[in-house]
Image (spheres, rainbow, N blue to C red):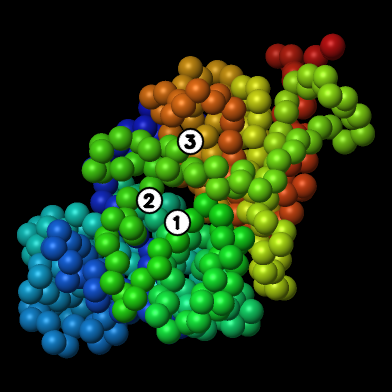
Amino acid sequence: MSVSAEGADQAAMPRLPVSVLTGFLGSGKTTLLSHLIRQPGLERLACIINEFGEVGLDHLLVERVSGDTVVLDSGCVCCTVRSDLIDTLCSLFMRRLRGEIPEFDRVVIETTGLADPAPVLHSLISNPLVAARYRLDGVITTVDAVNGGMQLDEHPESVKQAAVADRLVVTKSDLASPATGGALLDRLRALNPGAVITIVVQGKVSPRALFDAGLYNPETKSLEVGRWLNEAAYLADHHGHAHEPGHDCGEQCDHDHHHEHHEHDDHAPRNAHDRRIASFCLMVEQPMPWNRVLDFVDELVETYGDRLLRLKGLLTILESPVPVAIHGVQHLFHPPVPLEGWPDADRRSKLVFITRDLERAIVETLLHTHLEKPDRDESGADAEA
């Protein structure tokens, strides 16, 4: 990663937003998507799905453009996944460019019910052809209000789908008892405090509740850091600070780097799968040298990349006059984005983590270790104090 104008240009350029629609088997993804493609204002939507029959297209007027693409009477384009998602995204874009299909300005990718969404996110981030044309808007995860608790208990895929979501959509709420529905909501908030939760019946939901979850908001033509990071959701319950191991700080302690850590409500329902997921926010009071941030991220990814589900950060960098936003999914990171300015008066660096089998203390210690490394002189030797 490097701090440059390139990141800002990539965030602001009109790449097509992509939403990943995931959720466990029977959780209502198809019903939700079928409702969306009928909504006014979404005529320029492209859907990448597994099978046409699964989206309830039978009673809609369709024009078959090719074997794997249809155009709905509403104007939406639907395309089945080829052997490779990257090929499908590139082909869809080129056919749009050549005028072979209607111009679309937003994409929804529906995954299978047992899918891990991480490979889809990797495709959007890592492939240069895809990343030049598309940008990740957010992950939308459907959860069945009746059976969601059982699925979270029995299927780790369901837990991961909920943990990485930007938007959680609770379906079939009309069929669940208040106690069952309430327990599920508490559990989802504990798993993923930063996600916006929307309760729907029969898949009926406003597109505004699902889309524009990314750093860049096309409606306002601006970067909306506070909405995207949503660190306040991680700060609601627990407050504290950590110092160098063995360092006994009194009330007047003025440490160079002050870290705060915050976690979910420990009283929320937690089963074995849930306990593998951790969500927390680390804060650093002082500006951080960029090379030490890079070292921290490199070691974090190299050592714990498989356990790092998502990382979002707003960083105050010593060498930069403006804050820098970072966003990573497991081993892969978007280019860092220098912002025009701070969203508010708070100048602390904030890093929001969602991890699996990776405790906050390990991440905090790793960050602290890199920030507290002694400066080096030009020869590479440790500088004398």
The image position of residue 333, as x and y in percent, is 51, 46
Q: Residue 1: horizontal and vertical position, in percent?
A: 52, 36
Q: Quadrant of the C terminus?
A: top right
Q: For the point 88% across and 25% down, which residue is it?
A: 250
- Identified at 46% across, 26% down, the residue is 344
Which residue is label 1 attached to? 196
Q: CA distance from mark 2 to mark 3?
A: 15 Å
Q: Classify 139 as above or below 361.
A: below
> Are discs 1 and 2 less than 8 Å apart at CB?
yes
Horizontal side of 351 relative to 230 (left or right) equals right
Indicate which label's residue lies in the foreground, 2 or 3.
2
- Kindly indicate whether the residue at mark 3 contacts the one at mark 1 (C-beta within 8 angstroms): no
Q: Amino acid at mark 2?
A: Ala
Check disc 3 and report the residue beneath it: 325
Label 3 amino acid?
Ala
Q: Amino acid at mark 1?
A: Val
Mark positioned earlier in the residue sequence (2 or 3):
2
Q: Counting other residues with Cα less than 10 Å from the Cα at mark 1, is it few (<14), some (14-19), or many (20 or more)?
A: some
Secondary structure under the numbered disc 3 in the rendered image: strand
Q: Secondary structure at mark 2?
A: loop
**Which of the pair 253/134 is nearer the observer?**
253
- Is residue 303 visible in the rendered image? The answer is no
Going by the picture, which residue comes out furthest to the front?
178
Q: Quadrant of residue 72?
A: bottom left
Taking the spot 50% from the left edge, 63% from the top edge, the residue there is 118
Q: Name the mark nearer the viewer: 1 or 3.
A: 1
Residue 213, label in figure: 2
Label 1, label 2: how many angstroms apart (C-alpha)? Answer: 9 Å
Q: Is residue 60 above or below residue 269?
A: below
Q: Are marks 2 and 3 in contact (CB under 8 Å)?
A: no
